[in-house]
Image: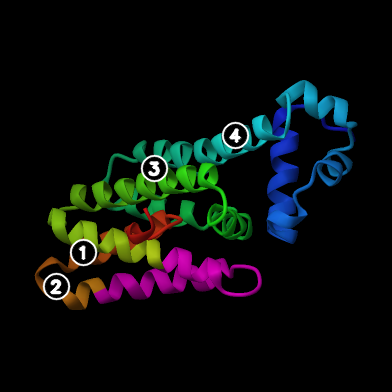
Amino acid sequence: MTVTNREGFFAAAMALLARDGRAGLRLATLCRDVGVTSGSFYHHFGGWDGFVDALLAHWEAVDTHRLAELAAREPDPEGRLDVLKHLALTFPHEAETAIRAWAHGDERVAAVQARVDEHRHRVVAEALVAADVEPERADRLADLALAVLIGRQQLLGPTDVGELLRVFDLVSDLGRHDDPDHSRGAGGSLAASNRTGTSSTRGER
C-alpha cells in the first residue's frame, strides 16, 4: 500500500538507516520504499535539507520527548525508573547507531544528537533523584546508563534488547554494591538510569 504522509517517509528513512546506514539513505531509494514519486517527497519537505531537518525533529520528539512524557505519567519514583528502562529497549537502536555515525560529519545532525543525549541524561538523573538518590551520584549513574546503551548499540549486528536489559540489571547491582546505604535508591534507580537508555554519553554532549 502506498504511504503518502510524512510519517511514512520517516519510518522508511529509519529503516534504511538501520539497514544500510547513512549511505543507504537516498532520495530514490526512500521514494521507492515509501511507494511514491519524488514529487510527493518535494510536496511534503520542499527538498532534501527540509527532509533531514524534519526527520531529526521527528526522532527527537518520538524517541526522547514522547517517551519522557510517558515515563512522567508514572507517579511512583521506582516505577518510573522501571518504565524508563523498558522504554529504552524500544529505541530504534540500529538507526540510532547510524545517526550517531552521521553526526560525525554533519553539524546539523550532531546538534540534534547532542540535544537528545542531554535530554535523556536529564530525564534519567531526575528520575533517580526522585527515587532518593543523591544528585551528584544520580548524575554519574545517568552517565553510566547512557554509556551502557551507546556501547551496546555500537556492537556489530542488531542490538540484543534482552542482553541490554541484563546489562542494565548488572549496572543496577553495581550501584547497590557501590553504595550499600542507598541500595534501594541507587540500585533501582540505576536500573532506571539504564532504562532511559539514552543515546549518548555526556562526554559527547
Q: Marks 2 and 1: CB-CB under 8 Å?
A: yes
Residue lying at the far left in this picture: please name it. 181
x, y percent for residue 77: 26, 48
Taking 118 as reference, is 165 above or below it? below
Segment tinted magenta in the rendering: 148-174
Q: Marks 4 and 3: CB-CB under 8 Å?
A: no
Check disc 2 and give the amino acid type: Asp
Residue lying at the far top in this picture: please name it. 43
Q: What residue sits right under mark 1 in the picture?
A: 186
Which numbered disc flags the more N-terminal residue, 2 or 4?
4
> Label 3 neighbourhood size at 10 Å, few (<14), some (14-19), many (20+)?
many
Residue 38 lies left or right of residue 54; in this view the side is right
Based on the picture, tell me whether residue 191 belongs to the magenta stretch.
no
Check disc 3 and give the amino acid type: Ala
Q: Which secondary structure, mark 2?
A: loop
| Alpha carbons under labels 4 and 3: distance apart | 26 Å
Q: Which secondary structure, mark 4?
A: helix
Q: What residue sits right under mark 4 in the picture?
A: 53
Q: Which residue is drawn at 75% across and 27% down?
A: 5
Q: Which mark is residue 71?
A: 3
Which numbered disc flags the more N-terminal residue, 2 or 1?
2
Judged by depth in the image, the label closer to the viewer, 2 or 4, is 4
| Alpha carbons under labels 1 and 4: distance apart | 38 Å
Which numbered disc flags the more N-terminal residue, 2 or 3?
3
| Alpha carbons under labels 2 and 4: distance apart | 43 Å
x, y percent for residue 122: 30, 47
Which numbered disc flags the more N-terminal residue, 4 or 3?
4
Of 114 and 10, the residue lying toward us? 114
Check disc 4 and give the amino acid type: Asp
Q: Name the quadrant containing residue 34.
A: top right
x, y percent for residue 99: 58, 53
